[in-house]
Image (tube, grey):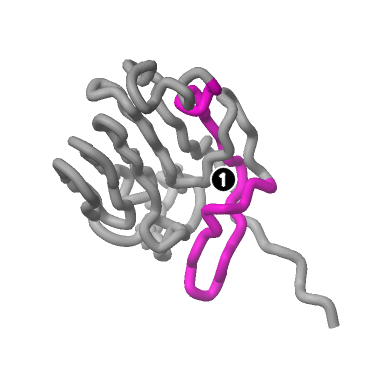
Amino acid sequence: SPPPPPEFLDLVFPNYSKNDPTQANVGNCMPQYASGHFHSEWKWTKFRWLDKQLLRIDSTDHTFATQVAGSSLLNFGVAESCGINGQGEVVADLRGTAYKIAGISSCYEQVLSGGVMCGQWKVIGHRAAINMVCTHNNQRCRVDCSGSRGYCELDAGYLQLEHALFSPSPPPPSA
């Protein structure tokens, strides 16, 4: 029998990955700057489940993604900058769903050369930094990626979720 059709998680708020062209028109970054790579931005309205039982989101699926700007295909969770003052950005916003981003709620890491982890993300590059801040009980996380050729991505290749535990709403006031 054929495999079941893919399942998707409906998103209430925009989720996006974007690069930053600030100060990227220099040195080894000039060709990608000229091609529009550092201007690239993608937004998702639904995420495809890679494994629904394990609560893993497929970061490579673009079925319900729209290219907003630039020339490059960005997977979810990817952000890049090439200028010291540039700041690529990822927003994972699961508010309005029954899920939250798994793991720690904030971190900041820098690396002179090579790579370092911050939550589910890693940053690679030269004088690169990553700053992750999650709010709303880890239902909304913003990941900023900067550096002279700073590149951030989901280390496992997918976004790991957890069930969000909600307190029941208080009963309406009695008349």
Query: Which structural element holds mark 1?
Result: strand
Q: Position of residue 31 (x, y in %)?
A: 47, 23
Residue 73: horizontal and vertical position, in percent? 58, 38
Q: What residue type is labelled 1?
A: Leu
* Magenta stretch encompasses residue 153: no
Instruction: Give residue 162's position: percent from left, percent from top.
Output: 40, 64
Quadrant of the rendered structure where residue 95 is? Answer: top left
Q: How crowded is mark 1: few (under 14 residues within 10 Å), some or many (20 or more)?
A: some
- Considering only vertical position in the picture, is 109 above or below 148? below
Q: Is residue 16 left or right of residue 113?
A: right
The residue lying toward the viewer, choosing from 173 and 16, is 16
Query: In the depicted view, which residue is nearer to us: 152 or 57?
Result: 152
Q: In this view, does 84 lie above or below 62?
A: above
x, y percent for residue 5: 76, 66
User: Which residues are drawn in magenta?
Assistant: 35-63
Residue most extreme to the right: 1
Q: Residue, x 53% and y 75% (percent of image)?
A: 53
Residue at screen point 42% across, 64% down: 163
Q: Quadrant of residue 148?
A: top left
